[in-house]
Amino acid sequence: MNIRNILLIIAIFLSPITFIFAETIEDYNVDIKINSDASIDIKESILYDFESAQRHGIERKLIVESDEDRPAPKYKNIEVKDENGKIYQMSTYNDSKYYVLRIGDPDTLITGQKRYIISYKVEKAMNYFDTHDELYWNAIGTDWDAPIKKATVSVTAENIKDSSCYYGSYGSNSSCTLTQKDNTLSTEVNNLSSKEGVTIAVGLTKGTVYQPTKEDEMKESILENIYFPIPIIIFFIYLFRWYKYGRDPEGRKVIVANYTPLKDISPLESKTIMTESVDMSKIGAEMIQLAIKGFIKIDKIKEKGFLSSEDYNIKKLKERDESLTPFQSEFMKVLFGDKNEISISEIKKMAQSGTGASYISSLNSFTSGSGSDKIYTKLTQEGYFPENPSDVRINNILVGILMIIPMIVVPMIIGSGVSALTGFILFIGVMILAGSMPKMTNKGVEAKEYLEGLKKYISVAEIERIKFHNAPEKTPEHFEELLPYAMIFGLENEWAKKFESLNYQPEWYTGPSGTALNSVAIASSLSNINSSFTMSTASSGSSGLGGSGGSGGGGGGGGGGSW
């Protein structure tokens, strides 16, 4: 390969790099005014050339972290305009040590040159010494991605005593020349590379700017930290509310084995009594009980194809009647709609494709809200809860939010106090505490302990079972009676193993042709239908979619780039 071809290949590979770094800052002007109250006003004028690159705008990264020599600067009154005074669209976010201004329209792409005029006030920017007051400021930070062709910085202040200027990459000692006219110092530096900036130090006669006293610092510290006990206060408020309104009555605390379900209490209702919350992930247990009662039949089938998978066809055998709970009756209604049979795969396909929108909407509404309401209402009316647990949770969440909002908004208005993270922690804490507020009646606690006894009976090994007095015989009827309840406990396989030796073929369930059935195989299959149905309904929930050192060593700084 000759030298000409080699050079051509190198040029081809380097050309994208040249394109990537084509963006430049043509002109970067920074005007700083030091105020007598020790704050500084800054106005940055940035002429950014995107050239042919299509971007939305620029990001300006302001440093917000503190160091050993100075506290974290506080930025106020941030505003971004163009040369004609038109305000740019802007959003902000925190990124490690930066407070980032994202300037530009996310829906609009731009090219060529654009001017950005950024103005803001900074507090806690000054340093104080025995002989002088000082501003040591990274006027142009060392974190800019694009090179800067022309950089100018000016500082206006009373009683300027001394000054120095540095430019280059972080830590550089290269000096820049400062000129003074009246109360203004200025410097100009040309052809700064990417990651190079300008830092200026200005010493003022001692006492030119206000220096906070110990009392000022203490007052500010108190104001900044006065809101931090809020999480503790809210925790104790909710603890008191739980102690007074949310504690369940004392039960017997002795759990004895029970061999039958609670009368007229369905599997999901039983689960709700135990946890004080409806768990729709166990809705398959209700389907199994409907089958055992003779209302539906479940057929396990295999989908056609080389990579076949399990599917379940559900057939309605008879219409709803008064023997069903309100939840079960409504479940049958939304499950079948105007059909007499439906498969799990059919539900999933309708959810994913968007067909059958009315059916899917009705099913979603039931599994995400109205179904739970029917369980809560029934258990409350029958005396297991003094109040609807869902209403109790919602009311306590609303009370908590109403308590949190002023504790966050007021500090934000006065410029100190609770951070977004603290607010988020408070919200999560309220959600958790509100979840524990529902209270049970004496009847509810007795039912809960009864169900714990039922769970104990279902879960024990066969060798332990013989110790129970008057335990029922192992019959198909007994297996079926407790199978839905074993499912809500997550013990269907353990329960099935106790009946493995039975010659058992239920009328309400059939497996694929040629499949051997026993209690274990049936329980395993029905465990799958529980998860399959939950996953199919979940599918419908989505729509598809200082002082000395060098450049970069002072306060301020940061940088930016295009986005």
Image (tube, grey):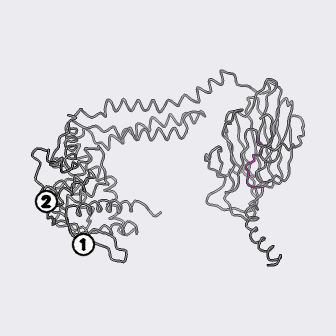
Q: Residue at x 10, y 53 (%)?
A: 473
Q: Quadrant of residue 30?
A: top right
Disc 1: which residue: 512
Give the quadrant of the N terminus: bottom right
> Left or right of 406: which side holds 237?
left
Q: Residues within 10 Å of mark 1 (few under 14, many from 20)?
A: few
Which amino acid type is shown beneath numbered disc 1? Pro
User: 350 and 120: which one is in front?
Assistant: 350
User: 188 and 65: which one is in front?
Assistant: 65
Give the quadrant of the C terminus: bottom right
Distance from label 1 to label 2 (Cα)? 21 Å
Q: Magenta segment range?
A: 138-146
Dot 1 or dot 2: first in sequence order is 2
Which amino acid type is shown beneath numbered disc 2? Pro
Q: Residue at x 20, y 56 (%)?
A: 483
- In the rendered image, is residue 310 in sight? yes
**What secondary structure is marked by label 2?**
helix
The answer to whether residue 1 is above or below residue 325 is below
Q: Residue furthest top?
A: 215
> Left or right of 521: which side holds 559?
right
The answer to whether residue 201 is above or below residue 143 is above
Q: Residue 493 placed where, x, y %?
A: 25, 56
**What secondary structure is marked by label 1?**
loop
The answer to whether residue 85 is above or below residue 386 is below
Q: Residue 475 placed where, x, y %?
A: 12, 57
Q: Let me know if residue 16 is in the magenta part.
A: no
User: 23 and 549: which one is in front?
Assistant: 549
Residue 493, disc: none
Residue 476, disc: 2
